[in-house]
Amino acid sequence: MSPRVEALISLSALRHNLQCVRQAAPGCHVVAAIKANGYGHGLVEVASALGDADYLGVACLDEALHLRNAGIRSPILLLEGVLAAQELVQIQEHDLAIVVHQQNQIDWLKTFVAKQNRPFEVWLKIDTGMHRLGFDPALAAHAHAQLCAIPAVAALKVVMSHLANADDRTDGKTDQQIRCFQQTLSEWDLPRSLANSAAILAWPEAHGQWVRPGIMLYGVSPLQGQVGLDHDLRPVMTLSSRLIAAKQVAAGETVGYGGTWCCPEDMLVGVVAVGYGDGYPRHASNGTPVLVNGRRVPLIGRVSMDMITVDLRSQPLAAAGDSVVLWGEGLPVEEIAQAAGTIAYELLCGVSKRVEFQYRD
């Protein structure tokens, strides 16, 4: 039985996008961010396809253990670090690198009694202005000194920070953060990591020795007003369904819940088997593009749990069973996100479990 809604994942596109990262940041080591189930694409499958990355970046221990249990042996970095002292045992056992961003994490490392002759690899995070995670720059040297004095800690691997507004090339905040980072580390001879996807493409002065691409790996532009194809990025996920009905509706009749869209003339209306129960955005507005048989048609009426309706006046021969693309190949997910008042990250991460995933190489 063919799937009702399908997410086709192109692993070759994923690898192509990794090469785009390397071309944009030549000579840099790469931490490929695959947290949140590989940005909704499948954690293990994405990790397997990105074996050429220098490290894999996940949010937490659970994600790292899922990878190790699946046989992934690539170096893994826990971007949120240690969430509880008892996690240190498994972190050491599975040879995971950790980000340290606050004092209690240092305190846990101080009191940890190593059971194996395997020191922790630590990345130190500094808050340069995003004010989310990281040590205040004034406290960074003290944090560094504490870490270097802990027997269970290997030599500090990298010093890192995170950019808040790098998606906007005109925003001065990024320059401020880069300067803060450089000034704080002016006397430190340590590898640096500051660049996310947006900075990889738009702020080469932020590259340092390690870059941390996320959304661009999945074919999405991290920069405002652009799509992945503007940077030779290829969409990794194509979400597709089919028409399950095509029916004539008279002029003046309304379509869908609440009657929010009224037919301006006698017209053909298509019903697509996808809705917010599958992860299609509930707040996608009238006019949001949908591909039917490879041609754009507009969404009309409200998105419901299992169905959406589309205007088929431009395709009078469309019929039940015809193919529909919701985003991906031929239809950038960035456009759908904009029409729904959200971001592509949320759409990709929000595809539900009832959607069938297919992986192609």
Image (cartoon, rainbow, N blue to C red):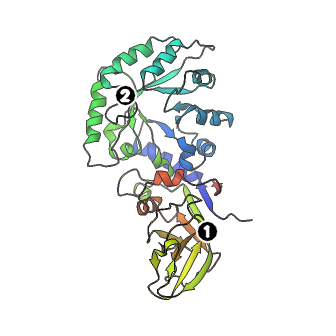
Report the front residue among 346 and 234. Answer: 346
Tell me the crowding category of disc 1: few under 14, some 14 to 19, or many 20 or more residues within 10 angstroms, Cα based.
Answer: many
Residue lying at the far front of the rendered structure: 258
- Mark 1: amino acid: Ala
Q: Earlier in the sequence, mark 1 or mark 2?
A: 2
Q: Which residue is mark 1?
A: 273
Question: Percent from the top left, x then y, of residue 155?
Answer: 47, 17
**Of labels 1 and 2, the one closer to you:** 1
Q: Residue at x 44, y 11 (%)?
A: 149
Q: Residue at x 75, y 65 (%)?
A: 1
Give me the disc on residue 126.
2
Question: Percent from the top left, x then y, of residue 264?
Answer: 44, 85
Question: Left or right of 177: which side holds 109?
Answer: right
Question: Left or right of 264: which side holds 89?
Answer: right
- Mark 2: amino acid: Ile
Tell me the crowding category of disc 2: few under 14, some 14 to 19, or many 20 or more residues within 10 angstroms, Cα based.
Answer: many
Above or below residue 252? Residue 323 is: above
SS of the residue under disc 2 = loop
- Between the C-alphas of marks 1 and 2, the distance is 47 Å
Q: Residue at x 51, y 56 (%)?
A: 235
SS of the residue under disc 1 = loop
Figure disc tally:
2
Report the front residue among 79 and 212. Answer: 79
Residue 47, image quadrant: top right
Q: Are marks 1 and 2 in contact (CB under 8 Å)?
A: no
Above or below residue 306? Residue 141 is: above
The answer to whether any part of residue 355 appears in the image is yes
Residue 360, image quadrant: bottom right
Give me the disc on residue 40.
none
